[in-house]
Amino acid sequence: MTQAATESRRGNGAQKTATFDAVIVGAGVAGLYQLYRLREQGLNVRVIESASGVGGTWYWNRYPGARFDSEAYIYQYLFSEQLYKGWSWSEKFPGQPEIERWLNYVADRLDLRKDIQFDTTVERAHFDEATQRWTVLTNKGDAIDTQFLITCAGMLSAPLTSRFPGQETFKGQLFHTARWPREGVNLAGKRVGVVGNGATGIQVIQTIAGDAAHLKVFIRTPQYIIPMKNPKYSAADVDAYKGKFQFFTKQLPSTFTGFEYDFEHAWADLTPEQRHEVLENCWNDGSLKLWLASFGEMFFDEEVNRQISEFVREKMRVRLQDPKLCELLIPSQSDYGFGTHRVPLEQNFLETFHRPNVEIVSVRTNPIERVTASGLQTADGTVHELDVIILATGFDAGTGALTRIDIRGRGGRALKDDWSTDIRTTMGLQIHGYPNLFTTAVPLAPSAALCNMTTCLQKQVEWIDNCIKYLRSRNLKVIEPTKDAEDQWVAHHDETANATLIAKTNSWYLGSNVEGKPRRVLSYTGGVGTYHRKCDEVAASGYIGFAMQ
């Protein structure tokens, strides 16, 4: 039966206790939908959100140039045609302000805010084996008792902000892109340094180059890129994509990466001329299609990957022309191959380096050593004097959002300790040793990296909702994956991942950007369609591999 929310005082009266059926951590894409689903089946639910508003990633990442690189019409909820068609996008890859407005539209249309506690951070969550319930403690002094704990904290929500010694001594302004001030930053007339040139760094660099008096870009690893084509939408364009709603609901969950397009060609079946035509067509689409729908062999076959990588390198050479810029901005095959890192979309990023006020500082063999009062000091002793430092230095992906919370399961075991030695989950949905803890956007599921996020997060939310519904219909209180089931999933995950070139490439996909993080491909590489089928099979079997009582 659903428990009514209760409030009482305990101890000296300074701490309030509330009781819920479910507590959700995070009010982003997954958290909003999870709240809606659980509330629809009659549960009393509370969402705890550290931000002042909804949006998750799209609340925090408001840096200059932040925008979708999934097409807007597929980065959407597909459970309600009315909700889908009630919002119209202005362009194919809209920017952060529009995305944040969309998520506020969702929250308002579904009347979700009344069950969200904003400006509150979950600090601890401990499972009580006697009561078989979780106690969730927040920075506001709340102690919340709940049967189910569901984490919707995001895969890229634990920014690596303290990257260099001496950051606190800098006399200018220093920002991490994931904590950009709401009021913005005035860069006019200033000497600006950007550290990092991944997908986020590229968006920032190409956007602010015209504002800063002088821009220094500190680059360690060059990136393969794809030029974005971002047309504005007319009313006819909007009607056209809305008319494909039913197609999207069927197509997106079955493709390899949850996008509308999928791999259609086999490399061995085509002539060199036909292969080149496919690559050109995908390149000219101005989307991630070259990466996610040209030739799947690029992830497994080194020779295929080499040829596709060279195709992209030549496209970049034509735009850069300058041999020195080519050396600094184009990866070599000895660095890594195309597609084994996250592939960014860009808008005149390469041309930015033709500007007289933009300078590259290579830190591959001359790394940044520290932040000084006046700027960034490299290993050779050079101090690059700056007024503003922007850290596009990434995240503790997949795991960081949860290891920054003191989560303890059976026997007092700590998730931070468990994941510090071996990153394990069961399908990215539950973790052995942590009963009634459900997870989204954590390792060993496609939502940890290789998926159009809304496609995968919706599936995970629906699986969790249906699992809880199954428990309640049978008057069961607790569910937890068995060790054997988790072992089997981890083995399957690793076998699939280790067959790819991704597993041979250092990147945040393997946690290589976080010192001491156990090495494992974070995302399930078997494909979104396969993952969804496996999730459905487990549910249809009555949740085989999960112990219930």
Image (cartoon, rainbow, N blue to C red):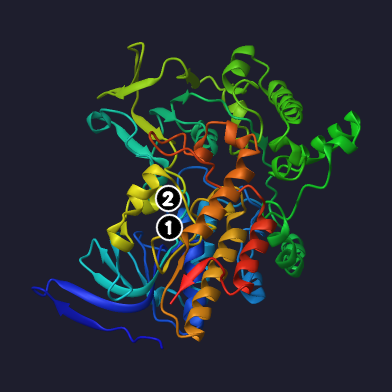
Front-most of residues 264 and 196: 264
Badge 1: residue crowd in 10 Å (few <14, some 14–19, many ≥20): many
Residue 119 in view here: no
Q: Quadrant of the C terminus?
A: bottom left
Cα gap from disc 2 to disc 1, whole angstroms? 7 Å
Residue furthest to the front in view is 484
Instruction: Name the residue nearer the viewer: 47 or 151.
Output: 151
User: Horizontal and vertical percent for residue 262?
Assistant: 76, 50
In the depicted structure, whether residue 332 falls above or below residue 79: above
Is the C-beta separation of discs 2 and 1 under 8 Å?
yes
Quarter of image, res 488: bottom right
* Front residue of this view, candidates 233 and 393: 393
Label of residue 120 in the image: none
Q: Which amino acid type corresponds to the residue marked 2 in the rendered image?
A: Ser
Residue lying farthest top? Answer: 380
Few, some or many residues within 10 Å of mark 2 (<14, 14–19, 20+): many
Compared across the picture, whether 272 is left or right of 122 comes to right
Quadrant, the N terminus: bottom left
- Label for residue 157? 2
Residue 170 placed where, x, y %? 26, 29
Q: Amino acid at mark 1?
A: Ala
**Local secondary structure at mark 1:** loop
Q: Is residue 421 left or right of residue 260?
A: left
Secondary structure beneath dot 2 equals loop
Q: Which residue is mark 1?
A: 153
Q: Residue at x 27, y 28 (%)?
A: 165
Q: Which of the pair 284/291 is nearer the observer?
A: 291
In the rendering, at what x and y percent does residue 242 appear? 72, 67
